[in-house]
Image (cartoon, rainbow, N blue to C red):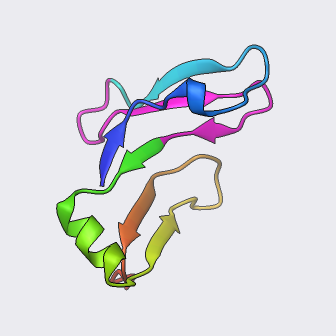
């Protein structure tokens, strides 16, 4: 999946929603362009690459893993198919 800048025109957003780039200056992470609403909802958008599309077209499910470590807004893995979670 490729991270893309969220297209605010695709959403109905409350006033004072702002654009935020998470991890912009953290080399160990990819920058996550997001829209953040006043009540703390974070919107990001992703595009599947050709391999992901082929899997999706063959009925493989999308998998989302949230690494919260019992804390708010931690790294997120969005993948097609299963993952080794050992």
| Residue with the most extreme left position | 51
Judge whether residue 39 is colored magenta: yes
At horizontal 46% and vertical 73% (from top left) the residue drawn is 63
Q: Position of residue 6 (x, y in %)?
A: 48, 32
At horizontal 30% and vertical 55% (from top left) the residue drawn is 1
- On screen, residue 40 versus residue 83, left or right, reads right
The quarter of the picture where residue 70 lies is: bottom right
At horizontal 35% and vertical 25% (from top left) the residue drawn is 24
Relative to 72, does residue 78 appear above or below in the rendering? below
Q: Quadrant of the C terminus?
A: bottom left
- On screen, residue 27 versus residue 77, left or right, reads left
Q: Position of residue 29 (x, y in %)?
A: 30, 41
Q: Name the chief secondary structure element in magenta.
A: loop
Q: Position of residue 72 (x, y in %)?
A: 65, 48
The quarter of the picture where residue 42 lies is: top right
Relative to 79, does residue 4 appear above or below in the rendering? above
At horizontal 64% and vertical 28% (from top left) the residue drawn is 36
Judge whether residue 26 is colored magenta: yes
| Residue with the most extreme top position | 16
Tell me the magenta residue range: 25-44
């Amino acid at each position: 999946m490729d991270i893309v800048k969220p297209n605010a025109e695709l959403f109905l957003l409350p006033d004072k929603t702002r654009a935020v780039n998470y991890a912009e200056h953290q080399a160990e992470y990819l920058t996550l362009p997001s829209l953040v609403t006043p009540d703390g909802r974070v919107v990001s958008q992703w595009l599947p690459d050709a391999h992901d599309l082929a899997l999706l077209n063959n009925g493989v499910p999308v998998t989302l893993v949230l690494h919260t470590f019992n804390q708010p807004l931690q790294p997120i893995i969005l993948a097609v198919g299963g993952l080794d979670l050992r």
